Image: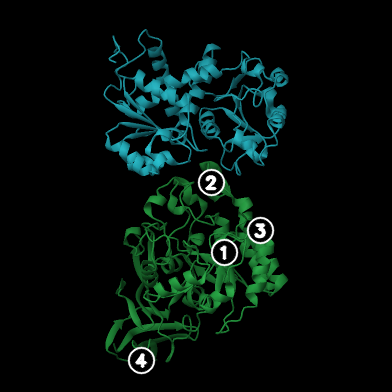
Chain colours: A cyan, B green
C-alpha cells in the first residue's frame, strides 16, 4: 500500500488485515515502553489545513510510537495564510525530504490531488465531505473489539445492522463508514432529514429512512454524526431542539435500543443535540474506545504505507529499551 | 500583397457543395472568383479539404483586460484562428467589466491587430452585478450587438424584464438586432455547488447544482420573452429540460435562440470522478440523458449554435482544490474537431451551427457566415475533415492549457484560415 486515500481503494480483506495489524500494535501499546523502531529514520509530516484535535494527536502519537520523526504543520501558522497555493506548499514540504504526508484538508479530493506533487506517501486524515478512512477503520476496529469481548471473534461485521444517523451529506465519516461497514458485511441504514441526505444514493449499498423510531429497536449499533453549528444557520434545519426531537438519541429512545447495541460517535459530541448526556454516559456507548482505537489503527496505516508493508510485521518483535529522545 | 488561391477543395456554403478553387484578393480582403483551374500569386493546397465560411463563436472569454496571465486578445484570437474561427464574440467578464464605452473601445482597439474579428459583447448590468442597466445604446453605437452578464445570470426578474424591453427599442445603424444572452443559473439554487447535483456529487462529497437551477431561469426568460416580445439567446444549455423548453418556445413562435458547448455534448458528470479541475465548468457537466437530449436538440434544430465558452485559466488557479478552482475550460481551438468527431451531422449542419447562424445572431453576417462567391468577404476556414490528431493542452495556442480534452484523439483539423483575405493559419500553423 503506497498511499492511503480512501477505503474505496481497498478490498474487504485489506480492511481486515489492517484491523489485525492494529491488534499487534495494541499489544505494543500495552508494553512498559509502548514503542517499536518500525519507522525509525522515517519522517512524517502532519499537514493539517483544517483544525483537528483527536485525529491530529492520534496520528502524531501513532507515528512516534513507531519511532518516526514527526513534523507538525498547520495552515493557520503557515505560508498558506500568505496565499501560497496547495501545490507550492506540498512541494515545499516534499523538497525537505519527507517519507509521509498525513493530510487533513477542508476540500474533497485533495489527497489524490497532491499525489503527483510529492514523492512521499500520502495518508488521508480527512478531506472535505469525501472520506475519512482512518476514522472508518478505527470505528470498525472498535466494533470488532467490542464483539470480541462478547465472544464474537473475527475481523468482520457480518450480520450487524448499523444505523448512521444525522448529517450524512456533509460527512466524510459517513461516506467512509458506509463503505467500510458494508464491505465488512454489515447492513447500513442511513437516518436523517432529507435536507442532510446526499442528493442521490444511487450505487450506495444502504437503505435510508427519515424516522429514527422506525428502526432504533432493530439496531446492533447506532452511529451518531455530529451536527455542525453552521448547518443550523441556513435552511437545512430549524433548530437544535427540533433536530434532537426527531433524531437525537434521547434518554427516552435509549429504552428502545437493544441491550447489547453499541453507541458510537466520532466526536466531538454535542450533548443534548445528537445525543443526550444519558446516552453519552450509557454503558452501551463506546466513544472512548473509539478514541483509544485511533492510535493502533493509525500505527497500522502508517506502517502499511511507510514500513516494509509486509505482514506479519518484522520489527515488532524488537523492543526499545529506552526512548531515544 | 496580391492574391491567394485555395486549390482543389470542396466549397460548402448555404448554396450547396461544389468542387472548386477559390481566389482571394489579399489587398481588399474579398473573394475574387470561385471556379475550376484558377490561379493566383500564391497557391494554398486544399486537396481533400472542405472550404467553409470561417466559424463564429458566440461565447469567448479573452481575459483582456484584467487576466492577461491566462489569455490575451492576441493569444486567444490566435487559438481561435487555429480553430477555424474568423470572428469571436468576446465576453464582458473582464476586469474592469466590459460595461462602459471605455472598455469596449479598448477591446475593439486591441482587436484591430487580432487574428480574427473581435466583436465585443457587453454586460447587461453594471459590473455584471444585476442591479443597474449598462449604457446599452452608447455601447450599441460602438458596435456591440450582444449583451450578457456572462458567467452570472440576471437574478432579478424585474431587471431582466426591463433590460429586454429597453434593449429591444435601441436602433442600430446596420439594422442588426440587439440580443440579450443569458447565462441561466438561479443562484439561490446553485449557490455553493461546484458540479452537477446527482449520483457523482453525492459520491464525491462535492456540493451540487441541480439541473433546475438552470431550467428555472430558462423558463423565466421564455416567459419574459413572451411578455415583452423580445429576443433572448440562451447560452451553454446543459440540461434535457432546458432543451425541451426551448423546443416548445420555438414551436410557440417566440424569439429565442440557444447555444450548447462542445463539452456538454461530450462529457457527463462522471468526468469529475477523479476531482480533475479541468472538468469543472459552469454550467456543470450533466448526465448521459442530458448529453443525449443536447445531441437531439442539435440534430432537430432546437439548438441553433455550437459555442465554445472558451474560458482560459492559469495552471496555478486550476491546481486549487476542486471546490475552489475557477470553472471553465479552453474551447476555440478544439471545437470543430470535437464536433466533427462526436456528432453524426452533415457538414452543412455543422457549418450552420458554427458559422452561418452564430454570425446572424452576433450581427456579423454576411461578412462572416455568408456565401462563398465573388465579392464576398474572404473569411474562410479550410478544413481537413479526416486528419487525425491528439489534443495536448501545452500545444494549444492559448496562454493557458486547461483543456478537458487532453490526449483525446480527434478527427478533423483546420488546415488554413483566411481572415479578411489574410492567411492567418497556413498548413495548421498560425502565420503570426
Image check: A256 left or right of A34?
right
Query: Which comes before the other along the chain, label 1 or label 2?
Result: 1
Q: How many circles with numbers are drawn on the protein?
A: 4
Above or below — where is A9 with respect to B151? above
Is disc 4 surrounded by few (<14), some (14 to 19) or many (20+) residues within 10 Å? few
First of labels 1, 3 by sequence position: 1
Circles 1 and 2, Cβ within 8 Å, touching? The answer is no
* Disc 4 with disc 2 on a shared chain: yes
The Cα atoms of the two marked residues, 4 and 1, are separated by 53 Å
Callout in the foreground (1, 3):
1
At a point 39% along the width and 20% down the height, the residue shown is A61
The one nearer the camera, A65 or A242, is A242
Which dot marks residue B36?
4
Give the residue pinned by disc 3: B216
Report which residue position mark 1 lands on. B126
Rendered position, B195 above or below B330? above
Amino acid at each position: 500500500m503506497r498511499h492511503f486515500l480512501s477505503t474505496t481503494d481497498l478490498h474487504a480483506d485489506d480492511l481486515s488485515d489492517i484491523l489485525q495489524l492494529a491488534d499487534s500494535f495494541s499489544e505494543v501499546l500495552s508494553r512498559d515502553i509502548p514503542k517499536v523502531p518500525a519507522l525509525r529514520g522515517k519522517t512524517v509530516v502532519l499537514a493539517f489545513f483544517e483544525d483537528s484535535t483527536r485525529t491530529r494527536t492520534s496520528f502524531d502519537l501513532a507515528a512516534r510510537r513507531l519511532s518516526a520523526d514527526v513534523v507538525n504543520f498547520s495552515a493557520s501558522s503557515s505560508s498558506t495564510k500568505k496565499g501560497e497555493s496547495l501545490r507550492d506548499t506540498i512541494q515545499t514540504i516534499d523538497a525537505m525530504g519527507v517519507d509521509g504526508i498525513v493530510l487533513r484538508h477542508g476540500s474533497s479530493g485533495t489527497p489524490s490531488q497532491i499525489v503527483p506533487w510529492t514523492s512521499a506517501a500520502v495518508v488521508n486524515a480527512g478531506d472535505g465531505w469525501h472520506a475519512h478512512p482512518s476514522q472508518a477503520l478505527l470505528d470498525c476496529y472498535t466494533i470488532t473489539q467490542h464483539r470480541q469481548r462478547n465472544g464474537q471473534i473475527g475481523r468482520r461485521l457480518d450480520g450487524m445492522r448499523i444505523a448512521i444517523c444525522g448529517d450524512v451529506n456533509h460527512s466524510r465519516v459517513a461516506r467512509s463508514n458506509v463503505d467500510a461497514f458494508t464491505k465488512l458485511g454489515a447492513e447500513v441504514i442511513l437516518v436523517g432529514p432529507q435536507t442532510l441526505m446526499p442528493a442521490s444514493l444511487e450505487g450506495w449499498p444502504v437503505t435510508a429512512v427519515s424516522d429514527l423510531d422506525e428502526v432504533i429497536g432493530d439496531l446492533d449499533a447506532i452511529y451518531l454524526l455530529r451536527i455542525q453549528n453552521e448547518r443550523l444557520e441556513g435552511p437545512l434545519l430549524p433548530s437544535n431542539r427540533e433536530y434532537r426531537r426527531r433524531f437525537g438519541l434521547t434518554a427516552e429512545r435509549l429504552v428502545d435500543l437493544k441491550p447489547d447495541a453499541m453507541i458510537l460517535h466520532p466526536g466531538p459530541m454535542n450533548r443534548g443535540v445528537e445525543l443526550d448526556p444519558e446516552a453519552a454516559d450509557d454503558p452501551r456507548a463506546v466513544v472512548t474506545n473509539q478514541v483509544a482505537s485511533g492510535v493502533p489503527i493509525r500505527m497500522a496505516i502508517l506502517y502499511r504505507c511507510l514500513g516494509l508493508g509486509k505482514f506479519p510485521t518484522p520489527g515488532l518483535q524488537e523492543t526499545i529499551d529506552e526512548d531515544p529522545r | 500583397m496580391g492574391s491567394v488561391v485555395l486549390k482543389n477543395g470542396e466549397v460548402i456554403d448555404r448554396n450547396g457543395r461544389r468542387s472548386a478553387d477559390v481566389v482571394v484578393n489579399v489587398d481588399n480582403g474579398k473573394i475574387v472568383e470561385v471556379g475550376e483551374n484558377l490561379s493566383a500569386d500564391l497557391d494554398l493546397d486544399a486537396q481533400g479539404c472542405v472550404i467553409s465560411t470561417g466559424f463564429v463563436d458566440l461565447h469567448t472569454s479573452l481575459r483582456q483586460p484584467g487576466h492577461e496571465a491566462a489569455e490575451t486578445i492576441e493569444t486567444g484570437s490566435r487559438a481561435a484562428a487555429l480553430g477555424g474561427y474568423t470572428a469571436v464574440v468576446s465576453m464582458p467578464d473582464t476586469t474592469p467589466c466590459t460595461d462602459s464605452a471605455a472598455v469596449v473601445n479598448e477591446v475593439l482597439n486591441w482587436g484591430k491587430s487580432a487574428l480574427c474579428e473581435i466583436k465585443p459583447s457587453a454586460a447587461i448590468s453594471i459590473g455584471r452585478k444585476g442591479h443597474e442597466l449598462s449604457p446599452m445604446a452608447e455601447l450599441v453605437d460602438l458596435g456591440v450587438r450582444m449583451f450578457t452578464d456572462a458567467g452570472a445570470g440576471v437574478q432579478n426578474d424585474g431587471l431582466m424584464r426591463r433590460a429586454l424591453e429597453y434593449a429591444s427599442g435601441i436602433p442600430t445603424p446596420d439594422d442588426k438586432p440587439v440580443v440579450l444572452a443569458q447565462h441561466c443559473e438561479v443562484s439561490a439554487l446553485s449557490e455553493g455547488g461546484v458540479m452537477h447535483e446527482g449520483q457523482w456529487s453525492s459520491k464525491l462529497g462535492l456540493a451540487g447544482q441541480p439541473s433546475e437551477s438552470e431550467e428555472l431561469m430558462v423558463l423565466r426568460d421564455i416567459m419574459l420573452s413572451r411578455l415583452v416580445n423580445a429576443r433572448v439567446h440562451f447560452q451553454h444549455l446543459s440540461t434535457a429540460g432546458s432543451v425541451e423548453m426551448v423546443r416548445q418556445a420555438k414551436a410557440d413562435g417566440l424569439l429565442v435562440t440557444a447555444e450548447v458547448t462542445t463539452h456538454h455534448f461530450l462529457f457527463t458528470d462522471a468526468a469529475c470522478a477523479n476531482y480533475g479541475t479541468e472538468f469543472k465548468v459552469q454550467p456543470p457537466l450533466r448526465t448521459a440523458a442530458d448529453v443525449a437530449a443536447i445531441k437531439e436538440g442539435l440534430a432537430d434544430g432546437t439548438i441553433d449554435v455550437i459555442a465554445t465558452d472558451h474560458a482560459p485559466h492559469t495552471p496555478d488557479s486550476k491546481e486549487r482544490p476542486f471546490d475552489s478552482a475557477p470553472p471553465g475550460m479552453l474551447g476555440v481551438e478544439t471545437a470543430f474537431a470535437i464536433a466533427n468527431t462526436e456528432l453524426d451531422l452533415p457538414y452543412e449542419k455543422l457549418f450552420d451551427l458554427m458559422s452561418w447562424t452564430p454570425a446572424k445572431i452576433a450581427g456579423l453576417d454576411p461578412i462572416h457566415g455568408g456565401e462563398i462567391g465573388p465579392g464576398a468577404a474572404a473569411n474562410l476556414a479550410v478544413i481537413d475533415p479526416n486528419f487525425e490528431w491528439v489534443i495536448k493542452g501545452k500545444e494549444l495556442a492559448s496562454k493557458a492549457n486547461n483543456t478537458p480534452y487532453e490526449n483525446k484523439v480527434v478527427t478533423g483539423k483546420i488546415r488554413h484560415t483566411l481572415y479578411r483575405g489574410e492567411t492567418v493559419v497556413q498548413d495548421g500553423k498560425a502565420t503570426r
